[in-house]
Amino acid sequence: MPPATASTLLSTLPARALLGRLLAVRVSLIAGWAAGIAWLHWGLHIPMPLLPMASVLVLMGLFSLSTAWRLRLDAPATQMEFLAHLLADLTAFAVLVFFSGGATNPFVSLMLVPVIIAAISLRPRWVWLLAAVAGAYYALLLFVYQPLAIADPVAAYGMHLGGMWFNFLISAGLIAFFVTRMHAALRTRDQELSALREKQLRDERILALGTQAALAAHELATPLATIQTIAHELASEFANDPDIGADCRLLEKQAQACKRILTQLAERAQDTVPPVLPLNDWLNALIERWQVLRPDAQVVPRLTLSQRDFEPPEGLEQAILNILNNAADAAAGRVEFTAAAENDALVIDIADRGPGFSPEQKSQAGRVLFSGKPGRGWGMGLALTHATLERLGGNVTLSERDGGGTRVRIALPWKVSA
């Protein structure tokens, strides 16, 4: 990921992804310093300035507690706040090194850890600022420090080599811990941004389709009224002809259904409140209207729902119709329609005996436009249904049906009117 991207993401990453990692490093350093001081002072009998060093460790501990409390707020971390934490840790570390040998302390190179953390987290100017502060502290510790009281030079040299080895292990562990966790957080946020961009593009396509649909609905009103009038006249004229009369009556019903759809579009544009019906009645009426539009299909409904009043959310009816049309197009057999209430959710299963979807299609269902029915449909129905259910807080899942075919499940939070 480019540095600019990482810097941009920092301002939106949750505090737990940044300060939480830094807090873990700080607590580890406090524990390490406390153990090292105790080992030198009581284990090797090297006098240490316990009071000032303990004071620094206590202050770092209090700072860690305040950071832990701040993490409970779960607020975004800013560049300046993160920089302030790194500066505080670097300063406390420099003070501890001052009381324990200065630049001769083999652990002095641990002052690079805050700089490395800043390099993968902050903007370049703050990284260079922290690097300059660390360099200034190191230069100062070359000349100003309290030396350790070690009488034996050979023992001092051996301790220095051992400390350098242990310092290398600590540095490698801390850097690996923080860098890998930081990169994991950035990758997660990058995936979230990619998903948001994909959703935005899909919503833009659906919005464009809705605009075209509104224009088409406006233009279709007049020719549909003409078709309905002519179909009614022909049905009356050929009332005694069983074949032509039936076709004319079917044509009239289809025209009426189209006109009803246009009327519903107009009502939604005017924010008209939909009628409240018992859920069973609403679903039965929806299936009856669909059968008028698709007389070639046969649906077998099984409804096990309460008779409490139901206020259908906008778009749910069309989402169900889209799935029913897909099921009828997929196979000539019966379409099973099952509705039930499960765990405070309305669950609708629509199953067919068609060829089903490939694993690739199921993984992309509703996210990209494709059609499993060559020559029939534009592949838009499932995408519209997915977008509608996502907006309503529900979801659409595809699965294999026992014995062949596809089962599409619509799950929506259970919302009924009082």
Image (cartoon, rainbow, N blue to C red):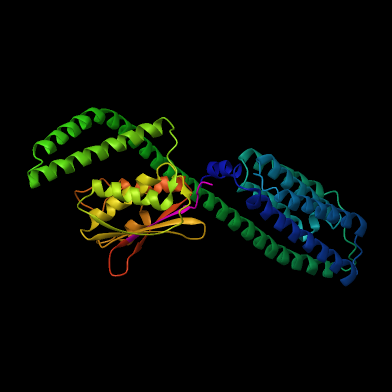
Residue at point 54%, 47% (across, down)? 418
**Picture coordinates of residue 275, whole percent (x, y):** 42, 40
Q: Is residue 291 left or right of residue 116?
A: left
Task: Kindly indicate the quadrant of the structure image that contains residue 31.
Answer: bottom right
Residue at position x 76%, y 56% in the image: 108
- Seen as rendered, the residue at the extreme left is 241
Quadrant for residue 401, please give it: bottom left
Q: Observer-nearest residue: 289 or 154?
A: 289
Residue 407 in the image, given as x and y percentages of width and height: 34, 61
- Please tell me whether residue 352 belongs to the stretch shown in magenta: no
Which of the pair 307/111 is nearer the observer?
307
Task: Using the image, determine if residue 41 lies above or below residue 59.
Answer: below
Question: Magenta residues?
Answer: 407-418
Whole-percent x and y of residue 348? 39, 56
**Residue at the spot 17% in from the left edge and 43% down from the top edge:** 250
From what the image shows, is residue 231 above or below residue 360? above
Q: Would you place residue 348 above or below residue 154 in this image?
A: above
Q: Residue 409 lies in magenta, yes or no?
A: yes
* Left or right of 97 in this view: 256: left
